[in-house]
Each structure stands twice: as C-alpha cells, then as structure tokens.
Image: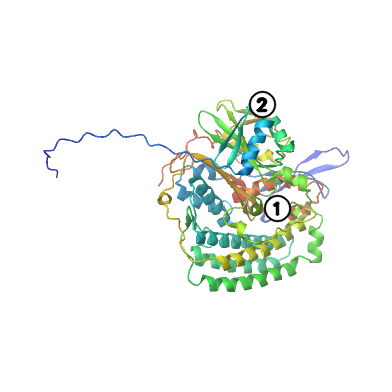
C-alpha cells in the first residue's frame, strides 16, 4: 500500500567502495634490530625485508630458500634454530610459502616468504636443514600441490593414496553437497 | 595382521613386518605404524597418519570468526580450552582488541586447569600402556573433578566453546570460589597420590628409564616442543619465552629433564601439574570482579583488518600456534594450525631406532599425541 508522493525523487548518492583497513605494523625492539640484521646479512640475495603486524618478513626467490634457511640457522646474529611452522597460503594468482622461524636464545622471530606460480609450484626442500620440515612439506604437497625438490618421500600424508586435486586451494570446491 | 618377509643386510635373518594400528588401543586414536622387526629389535618404522583428517583448516575458511572457535575445540579434544585460546588470541591481536582483566584471569585459570586435566589423562593412560590398571583409575578420578568444574562454568564437559573474541561467554558461577577451594585441596592431594603411586615404581622405572632417549639437538631439529622438549633439557616454554595473555604476572617454574627418555617425559608432566597449580593459586588471589567482554562494537561480527598474525601458545602438548590470514571480510582467508603433536610425532621414528618391539607402545605413549590435532 504505497501512496504516490509529490516530492521529486532524491538523487541517489553513488555507493562508495568499502575501504578495507590494513592491520598496523607494530614491531618490538627485537624485531627492529632483527630487520636491520637481515638487511645486512641478505644484502647479496634478491631479498626484501618487510613487516606485517608484529612479524619481520623476508621475501626471497624460491631458488634461494635453502641457502637463506641455512644462513638463518647458522649465522650467529640470527641463530634461528627452531622452525616454528611451514605453511602455504593460496592467493589464487600465486602460492605463498611461509617459513616461520624463531630463535630460542635471542627470542626473536621472522618469516621467510616465497611466492610460487600456482600452475608449477616447485621449491627446494629444506629437510636437509631441519628434519622437522619433513611432514610439513608433505602436508603442503598434499593440500596445495607444492613440489619440494630433494624431499626423501613425497607420498600422501594426510590424504589417502590416489586422492584427486588439492583440497587446500581456493579452487577446490568447498561444499559439493546440499545441506539437508 | 599382515605379515610378509623380505631379506635384510643380515644374510641369515629375515625381517618381519608388523602392522600396529590403526585400530589398536595403545595408539591413542587412529594411528598406524608399520614396524619392521629383526627378532625383538625394531629395524625400521614408518608412521601413517591422516585417518582423522577432516580438513579443519579449510572448514575455517567458510565460517564466521565466532564460529571458528567450535572447530578449534575439536582439534586437541583433551586440551580444548588451550586450542580456543590460541585462535581467540590471534583474532584479538589482528583486531587490536583489549580484553578485560577478569576475562584474562578466567582464561588463564581454565586453561591451566585444562592442562592439569590433560596431563592427568596422560598419566592414567600411560600406566595403562604398560599394563598398570590402577593409575588410570586414580588419574581419571582427579580429572573427573576438573570436568565437573568445567561443566558448571562452561556448560559442557568437553567441547566448551566458552572463549570469545574479546572475552569469555559468561561470568563464573557464584559458587566458583568455593568450588575452586575444594578442588584445589583435592587436586593437591590427588596429584601427590598419583606421583607416589607410579613414579618410583620399580617396574615402571625398568620400562621407562633410558628408553626412547632424544638429545636436545635432535629434539630442536625435529621441532619437538612442550614437555617432550623440556624432558631433553631445553628450558623452553612459550609462556615464558613469548608471554601471551597475562602469563608474565605469575611466578612459576619450568620443569626440565636430563636424559630425554620416557621417564623424563613422564615426570616433566607430573611436575608441570604442580606448576599449573601454582599459577591457578596466584590467579585466584589476583582476580577481581569486572566486565568479562570488551566494550568494542567490532566483536559483534568480527572483521579483522587485512593482515596476518602468527600466535604461539603453550598447549599441554607443546607449541600450539595459529597462523591467521585475514582479507578484511568476516571469514578468515586462511587458518593454519601448527599442532604440537604433529611435529612431535615426526620424531617417533627416530625414538624407535634400535628399540624393542615391546617399547614401541611405551615410547608412543610418552609423546602424548592427540590424533585430532595431528590430522586436523
């Protein structure tokens, strides 16, 4: 039940695209000094030192990852003996592999990041540096199809033999059933 | 049991392949390990996991931030509140939310009680692994008291879904301090009883001393964390090396082992229960009344800003971390769970070298895995 109005229609304001805020960077003193060290140590590599929220990041080329990890573990000023985690993030146009490192003595942390093309993601394995990377790499291979060159055993870990597709990727169907 | 034989380096010996699991009570879940034995010695072992893989990380990408907490309950189903805490902390860090004091204290008290409950379960089951029936009854009796308290606070015995981004679901019941006093007295006595019953038992010592030893270097190389790492002599605890929540306000020690064998891994946990009791006592004394939820309208439907955080917490099993990537929407873009059991289990193969078949169960029990977080 609407009554016709005599008022002229108000011109509609064009809808603005919502601005998505970015989380502010807040590095502590250890993070600041570590980024200076990283800039110095990895000056020869094609590497960018950055930061996200409270974590120092070091973006390197995929071919350099083994050398970078070895230096990160052995260099006395970095001394990151603990591989916290190895994870993959699917950004559709690229696959990002994160190596989160931590130093138990100096208590500083940073993440090595590499970007891979999604159609041919190949990266050197770091099992020779940390034996603990073994299952993390197998999991990344299962769920995202990242191939780790030089890994001793790339057989499926979490998925069953003969599973088709990479369920971690964004392109993998989320629900292929209707709720009932 | 599948048996087949194959020749080895020893010209006259034949290796026997034994399948342990996935349906085997001492594997603590659905876990299979294929063991090649030469007589009573283990020559080679190959663990197989993934029987419980539910794709929890992928499922998180389809849920709202507030719904993800229920999925985290189901990762480490013995230390659920510690799992919830990790996710909630990650989301709060990304959004920059200040949590009220009282909520922080409630979280710490419940998380530490959860740690004790988890270690009590380990204690009981570990005795059972070696054929000792009584420790199970003692351990579960004490754990039951904690479960009852949880039921009165969260409404559930196991899948609590109690922590919220910005605080906790509801305030503690009125009789909580009284219940807590009673529980603390019972637990102090109960833990002492448990310790007395098993720790110095002659047969228990014979089964665990010097079995499955891991050196500190190997432990760090494998990424072992938690009680298993501390048993090898590394005083690393996330609550101290990277304090989260309000853990920097409490005075507590890190129990450290010497040899990294099964007995050290066992006793570090017994000692940890006492340290958790110390934390709870201090937290109960310091806690004051106040709000339990942050007064921030963003928590109604959390939309963290674009960015990523990696938050570590000390769960009963070790370094439980959440890598949370947000694209600014109300659902996480990517959630990666760094499960301590997953990394610790990798070293199982290493611990089994040259062990006897009968020790395989003892070694597996001492790592204290939860398959829910191994397979995710």
User: Residue B89, how many percent across, how many down?
Assistant: 53, 51
User: Residue B363, how many percent across, how many down?
Assistant: 74, 53
Do callouts 2 and 1 mark residues in contact (Cβ within 8 Å)? no
User: Residue B48, how many percent across, how many down?
Assistant: 67, 44
Q: Is residue A56 above or below residue B135?
A: above
- The label on residue B232 is none
Q: Nearer the viewer, residue B62 or B104?
A: B104
Cα distance between the residues tagged 2 and 1: 40 Å
Q: Nearer the viewer, residue B25 or A80?
A: A80
Q: Is residue A96 above or below residue A54?
A: above
Instruction: State whether residue B263 appears in this view.
Output: yes
- What residue is drawn where x is 55% and y is 33%? A164
Q: Chain of mark 2?
A: A
Q: Chain of mark 1?
A: B
- For mark 1, give the secondary structure: helix
Of discs 2 and 1, which sits in the foreground? 2
- For mark 2, give the secondary structure: loop
Compared across the picture, whether B244 is left or right of B260 comes to left
Q: Which residue is mark 2?
A: A45
- What residue is drawn where x is 63% and y is 68%? B142
User: Residue B295, how many percent across, how many down?
Assistant: 42, 55
- The label on residue B367 is 1
């Amino acid at each position: 039940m609407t009554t016709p109005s005599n008022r002229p229609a108000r011109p509609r304001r064009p809808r603005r695209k919502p601005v998505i805020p970015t989380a502010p960077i807040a590095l502590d003193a250890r993070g600041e000094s570590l980024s200076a060290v990283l800039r110095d140590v990895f000056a020869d590599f094609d590497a960018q030192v950055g930061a996200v929220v409270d974590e120092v990041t070091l973006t390197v080329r995929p071919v350099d990852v083994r050398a970078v990890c070895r230096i990160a573990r052995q260099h006395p000023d970095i001394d990151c003996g603990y591989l916290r985690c190895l994870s993959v993030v699917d950004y559709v146009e690229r696959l990002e592999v994160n190596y989160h490192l931590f130093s138990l003595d100096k208590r500083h942390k940073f993440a090595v990041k590499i970007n891979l093309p999604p159609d041919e993601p190949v990266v050197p394995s770091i099992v020779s540096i940390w034996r603990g990377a073994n299952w993390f790499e197998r999991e990344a291979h299962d769920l995202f199809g990242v191939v780790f060159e030089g890994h001793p055993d790339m057989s499926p870990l979490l998925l069953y033999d003969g599973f088709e597709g990479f369920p971690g990727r964004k392109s993998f169907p989320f629900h292929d059933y209707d709720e009932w | 049991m599948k048996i087949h034989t194959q020749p080895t380096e020893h010209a006259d010996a034949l290796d026997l392949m034994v399948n342990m699991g996935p349906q085997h009570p001492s594997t603590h879940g659905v876990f299979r390990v294929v063991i090649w034995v030469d007589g009573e010695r283990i020559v080679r072992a190959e663990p197989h996991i993934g029987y419980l893989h539910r794709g929890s990380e992928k499922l998180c990408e389809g849920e709202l931030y507030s719904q993800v907490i229920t999925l985290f309950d189901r990762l480490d189903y013995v230390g659920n509140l510690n799992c919830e805490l990790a996710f909630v902390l990650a989301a709060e860090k990304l959004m920059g939310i200040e949590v009220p004091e009282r909520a922080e204290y409630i979280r710490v008290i419940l998380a530490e009680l959860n740690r004790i409950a988890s270690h009590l379960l380990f204690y009981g089951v570990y005795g059972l692994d070696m054929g000792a029936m009584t420790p199970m009854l003692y351990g579960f009796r004490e754990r039951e008291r904690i479960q009852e308290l949880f039921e009165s606070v969260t409404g559930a015995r196991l899948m609590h879904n109690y922590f919220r981004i910005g605080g906790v679901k509801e305030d503690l019941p009125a009789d909580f301090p009284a219940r807590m006093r009673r529980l603390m007295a019972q637990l102090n006595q109960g833990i002492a009883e448990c310790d007395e019953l098993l720790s110095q038992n002659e047969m228990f010592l014979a089964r665990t001393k010097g079995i499955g030893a891991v050196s500190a270097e190997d432990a760090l190389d494998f990424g072992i964390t938690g009680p298993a790492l501390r048993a090898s002599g590394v005083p690393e605890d996330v609550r101290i090396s990277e304090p989260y929540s309000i853990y920097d306000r409490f005075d507590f020690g890190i129990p450290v082992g010497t040899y990294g064998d099964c007995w050290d891994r066992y006793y570090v946990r017994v000692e940890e229960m006492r340290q958790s009791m110390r934390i709870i006592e201090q937290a109960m004394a310091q806690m004051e009344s106040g709000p339990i939820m942050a007064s921030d309208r963003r928590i109604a439907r959390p939309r963290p800003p674009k960015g990523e955080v990696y938050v570590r917490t000390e769960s009963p099993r070790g370094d439980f971390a959440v890598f949370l990537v947000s694209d600014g929407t109300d659902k996480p873009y990517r959630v990666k769970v760094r499960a301590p059991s997953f990394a610790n289990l990798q070293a199982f193969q290493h611990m089994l070298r040259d062990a006897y078949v009968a020790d395989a169960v003892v070694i597996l029990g001492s790592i204290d895995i939860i398959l829910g977080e191994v397979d995710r």
